[in-house]
Image (cartoon, rainbow, N blue to C red):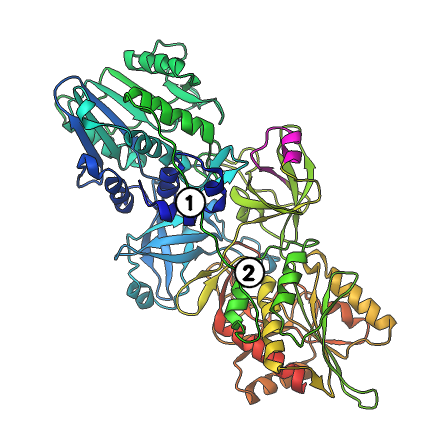
Amino acid sequence: MICAVAFAHSAGAELAAVGLRDLNYLTTLVETPAVCGYETEESAQIAGSLKKFHPVVDNLGDVIVTIGSGTPHRLIAAPIDEPGYIVGAITPDGYLRLRRLPLTLLPGAFNEMYAAQPVKIETTNNKSVNGVVAGLSIHLSPQRVAPPDPRDVDNMYVDVGASSAAEVRSAGIDVLSPVVINRKLETLNHTEVAGASVGDKFGAAALLSALEGVDSSKVSGTLTVAFVTQQWAGGRGLQRILATTPADELLYIGRMLPSAYVSADIRPPQTPKETPGSGVLLAEENAGAAPTALGANLQKLARANHLAIHADYSGAPAVPFDPTSDPPIEFPANWAHVGIATAWPDTPIEMVSISDFHALVDLLSADLGIAAQSKERSQLMFSGLTAADDNPPSTNQMLKHLVVTYGASKHEGPVRDEVKSLLPAWAKPETDDAGNLILQVGTAPASRKAPKILVIAHTDEIGFEIKSIDPDGLLEVTAIGGMYLDFFGAHPALVHKADGNVAALVLPPDGWDQPNFKWPTSANSTLKVDVGAHTAADVGALGIKVGDSLTIEKEYRPLFGTRANGRSFDDRVGDTALLAAVRALGGPLKDRNVTFVWSTGEELGLVGAGALARRLAKEGRGPDDVFAVDTFVSSDSPLESRRFADAVLGKGFVIRAVDSSNITPRKSVDRLISLARANQIPVQYGVTGGGNDGNEYLALGAVDVAIAWPLRYAHSPGEVIDTRDVDALARIVAVIAKSW
């Protein structure tokens, strides 16, 4: 068994609770990086699970098991590698440049699907380091005539939070370090599983599961089982096995393959036709051709075990041509290729049917003369963060907790509840009709002329909303907030319904695999979402309805030093800064008129802030100064123009003096700079894009002094911060509350 405990932790409760047999191997293999030519870790995992067979690992990384002796000599092979990248160079300022493996055979959008995504980098000491592929910030793109094209590998930089090449190398990252997109095995409606490299790994996982029941003493003849490397590099591992193994027959287990690319006037490319749920597939390169003896025997076994099996087109598995080989390396005459259908191949959401996978395991088991065994799963439970006053959470603990709380615009309730739970006991907030959480930090007597100060941060994040449910069970969603769709399409997601979350896949639009494909850019563009349903009724049975929200999955991931990655730092950092300031104040302020607000709907056009502004004005309680706490979208990135938005991560909070919605009076900027320096708080100031909640108060007589922290790759899964800036922001909020 491969790492049963690791399976339970990394795959999560969904797989564990359902008790899905055989998926422990698939989970572990998917979550183990195996870039073509760099499969060492995965080879070791596989060899470790086959100890009873005394496996041999050759110098290519192929894992080979030989059982029995004599004739016939059977060979079963499954590939284990996946496409990805290796580090090609390290820049002086600590970014990684990439070389893709393989260079060809992948859709044009493959590089683009890595843009602004969390990645894992393997180190020279067999560990992994978190990183993020740089992405453009949508707030800084207006007026740029030719922004960098994310499809071009020349525009791919990996950010690990380092500041120098020496710092990168000190962590064990060097040229040739493999880089893969961060992933886990997702389960859809207990019927399908998806994740990067699922299509590359299901064959090896099914073979490992079937081998569990093999009794070496009962094997007649010789059985060689090979888990082969570098299949994406033309089948070099398989070539090695064929050259050294005089087998009478070969069974290859892997995905169905498109035909080799040839010019359209000779022969148009052919592709597999079957979709997940079709059962086991038997490869057929020429339509209607009779199967080999091995293929016919597999069909017979499938029927005898009541397993669905269908012929489907597949090109032959690659084996490099070697003109020096005598005799030439080729497949045995009696060979067959079986697999299962893979949807969305070569994307981060490759998907297969669980029933198909089980059928493949059962067919392999029958072919080996054994029966598949069910396996029990364990489940790990995790406790949440509490805000007990006798053990108060740190600023960073609160940030981590808020970042992994979901709350797209119009659906911010969970975030508001978490903010309330993290407030100290003395804080008694109220919630208004717009959903804003309002805390009166200080109330001066009417006789005292104290300035009215309002500090506001928003609780919502960008996401999607379900607009319709198709008869075939797909959801149609539209964006909530500004975003580049290519950062979110073809990635795992969650549908948030009233009583919990449902795993989902945001599908790429039609034509995604064509060379000239471009993602839609209209604000009204829709995307399709798969939740594992096949009818609208199936969707209803999951409790999903029109109007529910959807977001891309996220987590808080430490990078180098004080850097971190996590989607929705915009504006959970602002929310955290207010929480930390409340705790730093220690209790209500005397002789001060200070209000803290956690607002709703900022990404939809400052909705909550506007409602509150109008109400306060009507009541004659409008603020004199509004401090809108939100992101300073920074050009501290290898992809952005340094023409403006020049604020460096780790150098302190930022006064957002000019943005798309506001120009702060210079005297207010200078006053805040002086206040920060007097309190030894690192401060920056500058110009950026985007609007802020304080804009809603301008027409009502207030001054909008927007404050922020520098953020890389805004409105993407790859957002990066420096936690020192979060601390500086929290400190200045407390100082403003006490002394502005």
The residue carrying mark 1 is: 378
Q: Amino acid at mark 1?
A: Ser
- Queried whether the magenta region covers residue 531, the answer comes back as yes
Q: Position of residue 316 (x, y in %)?
A: 32, 23
Q: Position of residue 291 (x, y in %)?
A: 33, 12
Q: Residues within 10 Å of mark 1 (few under 14, many from 20)?
A: some
Any mark on residue 403, and which? 2
Q: Is residue 196 left or right of residue 675?
A: left
- Looking at the image, residue 552 sits to the left or right of residue 11; the answer is right
Secondary structure under the numbered disc 1 in the rendered image: loop
Q: Quadrant of residue 452?
A: bottom right
Left or right? Give the position of 123 relative to 621. left
Q: Residue at x 35, y 27 (%)?
A: 372
Q: Quadrant of the C terminus?
A: bottom right
- The answer to which of marks 2 and 1 sits earlier in the sequence is 1
Q: Is residue 724 above or below residue 560?
A: below
